[in-house]
């Protein structure tokens, strides 16, 4: 257990960790304290994953490109955006130099593809049922 929890600090006594402002720590119970101090929800579960829309990803990548061009390193930019280097790499691999309208078009095509695949699967099932009925194997 963390020493701040063991010693029972008051609401206005700082932790000295630089992570949580004084007075904000004790209003949420033990799980909230663990989350704020260590990034866990309690019992060792990591914090919730953040999901970004494709539009948010593209805008963050364009912002990162502009900041990198001004002289910052990739690590500094990723820290500012709140993502890891691996996330940046994966996003660049997936979205590359796409523009916002291209991403929207890609998402709409993916949705249409899913719909058409379901339609083909449904028709294949109907065809198999009709063929079995014609053969008399029911």
Image: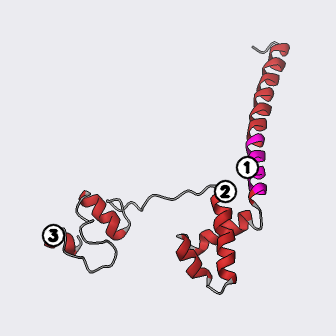
- Disc 1 on helix, strand or loop? helix
Q: Along the line of sight, which residue is nearer the eye, 85 or 44?
A: 85
Side of 12 where 115 appears, left or right: right
41 on left or right of 97: left
Position of the C terminus, as image quadrant, is top right
Mark 2 vs 3: CB contact within 8 A: no
Mark 3 sits on what residue?
10
Along the horizontal axis of the image, is 38 left or right of 23? Answer: right
Q: Is 127 located above or below residue 104 in the figure?
A: above
Crowding near the residue tagged with mark 3, few <14, some 14–19, many ≥20 C-alpha atoms within 10 Å: few
- Give whichever of discs 1 and 3 has the lower sequence position: 3
Q: Could you tell me which residue is drawn at 35 percent across and 59 percent down? A: 41
Tell me where residue 52 appears, x and y as whole percent.
Answer: 59, 57
- Name the residue tied to disc 1: 107
Give, as a single range, the part of the protein colored magenta. 101-112
Residue drawn at x 32%, y 59% as measured from the top left:
43
Quarter of the figure with residue 36: bottom left
Closer to us: 27 or 44? 27
């Amino acid at each position: 257990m963390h020493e701040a929890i063991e010693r029972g600090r008051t609401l206005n006594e700082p932790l000295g960790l630089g992570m949580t402002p004084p007075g904000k720590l004790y209003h949420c119970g033990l799980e909230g304290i663990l989350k704020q101090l260590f990034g866990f929800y309690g019992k060792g579960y990591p914090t919730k994953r953040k999901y970004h829309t494709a539009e948010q990803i593209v805008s963050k990548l364009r912002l990162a490109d502009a900041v990198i061009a001004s002289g910052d390193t990739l690590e500094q930019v990723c820290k500012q955006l709140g993502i890891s280097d691996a996330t940046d790499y994966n996003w660049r691999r997936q979205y590359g130099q796409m523009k916002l309208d291209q991403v929207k078009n890609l998402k709409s095509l993916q949705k249409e593809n899913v719909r058409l695949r379901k339609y083909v699967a449904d028709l294949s099932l109907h065809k198999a049922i009709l063929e079995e009925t014609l053969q008399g194997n029911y």
